[in-house]
Image: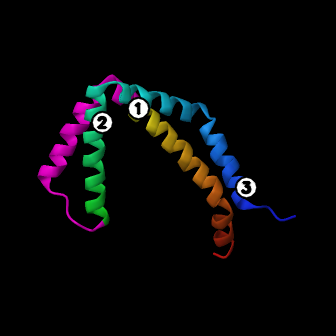
Amino acid sequence: MAVNMYDAAYELEKAIRQSDEYARLQTMYQAVNADEEARKMFEGFRELQLNLQQKQMMGEEISQEEMEQAQQTVALVQQNLKIAQLMEAEQVMGRVISELNQVIMKPLEELYSVNQ
């Protein structure tokens, strides 16, 4: 019997949305957005993070000044309890996604490891 992988993927999406980890992430995100100071600080942090990622993807070098600014920004946002909790929830959700990815990739890993 053939399995529709897309149906399984949508079921996985549904399971993620119903997970405790996602609920915590959502709650922490809403808490940050409800606090204007935290929201602005977090938006600035995310913008800096995205800019640095774009530079890396384009093969551009990140300057020492940019690295120092990023470190200062991280230290600042982590002092805000709401943002720190949000970042912790993001890390937990990231680990879950990484573990799910390992499960999804297992058939390919097994296939290619047999031929070695």
Position of residue 6 in the picture relative to residue 20 (left or right) = right
Residue under numbered circle 2: 42
Residue type of the residue flagged with mark 3? Asp
Above or below: residue 112 compared with residue 62: below
Q: Are marks 2 and 1 in contact (CB under 8 Å)?
A: yes
Residue of label 1: 86
The disc, 2 or 3, on the residue closer to the chain's N-terminal end is 3
Q: Is residue 85 above or below residue 73?
A: above
The CA span between labels 2 and 1 is 10 Å
Q: Image quarter for residue 55?
A: bottom left
Instruction: Rate crowding at label 1 as few (under 14), some (14 to 19) or many (20 or more) other CA atoms within 10 Å.
Output: many
Q: Main secondary structure of the magenta part?
A: helix
Residue type at mark 1: give it: Leu
- The question of residue 44 being in magenta is answered with no
Q: In the image, is residue 64 above or below residue 69?
A: below
Residue drawn at point x = 43 percent, y = 29 percent:
30
Numbered range of the magenta stretch: 58-85
The residue beneath circle 3 is 7
Residue type, mark 2 in image: Phe
Label 2 CA crowd tier, 10 Å (few <14, some 14–19, many 20+):
many
* Residue 58 place in picture, x, y as percent: 28, 67
Mark closest to the chain's N terminus, 3 or 1: 3
